[in-house]
Amino acid sequence: MNTARSGCEVWSVVRRLVALAALSLIPATALAGYKVYEKDDQTLEVGMRLQPRLEYSRIGQISGTGTEWQRDFMIRRARLKLNGKVQGVSFGFEWKIDGTDQIGSTPTAAVENAWFQYPLNGSLSTKIGLFDAPFSRDLLTSDSKQLAVDRGAVSAVPSALGLVDNVVGFDLRGSMTEGHAQYVIGAYDNRVVPGRRQDVPMVTGRVDLNFASTKDIYQDAHFGDDRWICLGVNGTVQSSIDGAVVQDSLSTEAAGADGMIDLPFGRGRLMVRGEINAIRLVAIGPTIDRNSTIMMIGAGYLMMHQHLQPFVRFDRIQGDTPIGGTGRDITYAGANLYQKGHSLKLQGDLQFVSGNNQSLDGGRLQAQIDF
């Protein structure tokens, strides 16, 4: 490997990302969510999320065994949102066109979230429709409030099996001790497994323990002076999944634990988040059992009057992952620049993958407006 040439490539990508970041420092006006209707016990709010992104990634050459850089300038996410309440019933709706001008993507309009939540009593409710399954803090943290530009492997690998991510179903959810203990359990369709192969729904449950603040527990940067100390455990199982042949059937199981602290530290705020998920495919028939373990740890320090947050995140995938692939370690390092919290910000990170003899594997710069 030519070290000098590799170093030049690294700095070339960094310089391009930094140049665009400097242009983004021009002050801008942030927007808040708009409440367009409120009468009696009915409310309606509208919102939007837009994420333009410049991304450099290392890919294989068209011919030969080497690698080259691929540049992609895209609209990673474009969302329109509605939420509100009717006669005490909360609802949410999100419509998306993701990946516009993204290489290898064919953007189409689709529903991302569509749900309503009935209160059963003061601390218990049922949620019905399309929404995130209660598994993985990484997944439950919106992609608009992540530490790095995108989510990590701890939610991406289980989602590839349909174990989490947006699902259709219903659950019961509640809280105790003024929200310091929260729980949810539900039954859902697996949107990856063909419908005719599913004899029983996927059952998923989660418990969150919040030892400090109970507000907005799923985000990777909080602002102000409050303290967050959170611990979560969750599990999911789906049995009697028909295989490719009559004699073949399997069940998928996953369990995980995660934690997050975010509190004032020195002249800023320190945020640390960790997660580990274990996945098991149990087969009856010619398919073999497979096991995977995925973990992550990330940390960021919010400083400069809570506007700048340097961060680092480490992902590890080991075992039969992503159920049939090879294990690897991935490190992300970057910074978030907040002009108006998560409503208006700029994110950038660099990606380093172990074991491939490359000094840098990618870089991303993303702007966001979200209200």
Image (tube, rainbow, N blue to C red):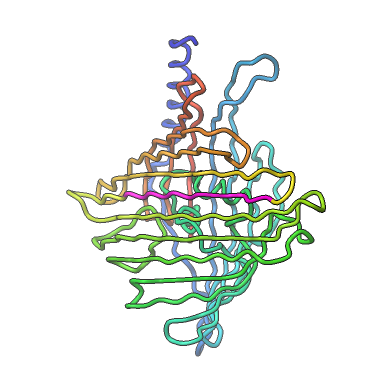
70 or 33: which is nearer to us?
70
Q: What stretch is highlighted in magenta?
A: 272-283
What residue is drawn where x is 54% and y is 35%?
Answer: 55
122 or 275: which is nearer to us?
275
Looking at the image, residue 323 lies above or below residue 64: below
Q: Does the magenta stretch include residue 275?
A: yes
Q: In this view, does 145 lie to the left or right of 237?
A: left
Q: In this view, does 64 lie to the left or right of 138?
A: right
Q: Does the magenta stretch include residue 315?
A: no
Looking at the image, residue 24 lies above or below residue 194: above
Quadrant position of residue 315: top left
Q: Where is residue 175 in the image (x, y as percent from the top left)?
A: 40, 76
Q: Where is residue 213 in the image (x, y as percent from the top left)?
A: 30, 67
What residue is drawn where x is 50% and y is 56%?
Answer: 255
Quadrant position of residue 227: bottom left
Looking at the image, residue 72 lies above or below residue 142: above
Q: Is residue 244 left or right of residue 90?
A: right
* Residue ranking furthest to the right: 246
